Image (cartoon, helix red, strand yellow):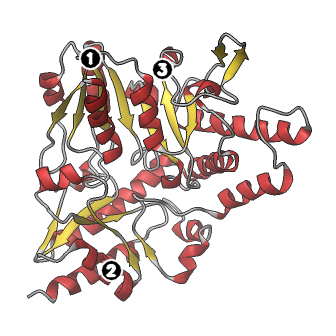
Amino acid sequence: MLDIKKIREDFPILRSGLVYLDNAASSLTPQSVLQKMMEFYNEYRANVERGVHRLSQRASQEFEEAHRKVASFIHAKSEAEVVMTRNATEGINLVAYGIGWRKGDRILTTLLEHHSNFIVWLRLKRRLGVEVDLIRPSKEGILDPRAFEDAITDKTRLVAVTHVSNVLGTVTPIHEIAEIAHRYGALLLVDGAQSVPHMPIDVQRLECDFLAFSGHKMLGPTGIGCLYIREELLEEIEPLCIGGGTIEEVTSEGYKLALSPRRFEAGTPAIAEAIGLGAAVDYLQGIGMEALAEHERHIVEIIHRGLSSIKRVRVFGPEDWKLRTGIVSFCIGDLNPHDIALALDVSANIMVRSGFHCAMPLHTEVLNERHGTVRASTYLYNTKEEAEALISMVEEIARGLM
């Protein structure tokens, strides 16, 4: 079990008494991460991979160590497979524009996706003439591998799918989908923005070719994310940007790109943020991802059961809370989700997300919720008492409609 009281001491923002249940949007940041970033600014503030002086050498070592920490965290073979990006969105775009597409190529994705793993493929369709095939999840947000088997063809070049729905919290059977994709010669890109921060991840077991995720959802700073690229693909994927730091050699006639990850990390990177992400990984590994996942399952069970028992409250996603992570989306009668979120903030100091959560097709075409939903999302510092406070306040709002 997690020592929640001790964990909460690492997050000064919680001392104000707020109940932070918007972790799927962005997590809070512990003091150790902030201190590690300030160490960079106070002790060895310099650019990386450029200077021979000791400040640059120290900064470069810390920056490279952050790659190694992330690689170990997701069980990549080496830090060469870990590219630092601004966020998961940039990582997905890097893949989208790094593949040498041919007209007639097909991309298979789903209506469960965050916009970042959806509209990028629609833009490729518009610009390059690739075809986009869509799989519809059940209303609970469950994706059936058999639907992928039925939809995939020999022309499918890429399967792009979320690991965990950012609206419904449902977990996608990635390993089974990977087997199908690879049998047809397709690559598999996984949006891990909602899975990497909340459960143990092993890219070898998932058998994905790409995995994108963001630092700010896993206790790290904003402006930093990662893209895992399977080593066999490192020289096949074209960098999104090239320039300073990405090259091995330049002549007046051409250039030779450096090895990964440098070939993908153009210009001066987000050095402090990458170092901070490494510290966030240290923090999560110190907690233990299995213990973290178990804690979230306990909290989400309380929330799901409590909200489901309230009249006029619609709770979305699997009725079996064991099939979901710490995300619960709901509506109260005909109330606008933004009004509910505002009431929770003003009346009970509870922070949640409201609206479409960057997943409009899922809301409008699968859930039939034209104004979106309210989303409560948990993390390692949330407590049973906070879950009960949310339930109590939602019940009070719902009772006002009777």
* Residue 382 visible in the shown view: yes
Which residue appears at 32% of the width and 80% of the height?
342
User: If you read the primary sequence from the N terminus, does the residue marked by circle 2 or circle 3 appear first?
Assistant: 3
Label 1 amino acid? Lys
Residue drawn where x is 52% and y is 54% of the image: 216
Vertical placement of residue 152 versus 252, above or below: below
The alpha-carbon separation of the residues under discs 1 and 3 comes to 18 Å
Q: Residues within 10 Å of mark 3 (few under 14, many from 20)?
A: some
State the SS at label 1.
loop
The answer to whether residue 200 of the structure is visible from this angle is: no
Q: Which residue is identified by label 1?
A: 103
Q: Which quadrant: the C terminus?
A: bottom left
> Disc 3 designates what residue?
237
100 lies left or right of 122: right
Relative image position of residue 313 (x, y in whole percent): 15, 73
Q: CA distance from mark 2 to mark 3?
A: 44 Å
Disc 2 to disc 3: CB gap under 8 Å: no
Relative to 26, say whether 132 is above or below: above
- Label 2 crowding class (10 Å Cα cut-off): few <14, some 14-19, many 20+? some
Residue assigned mark 2: 342
Q: Amino acid at mark 2?
A: Leu
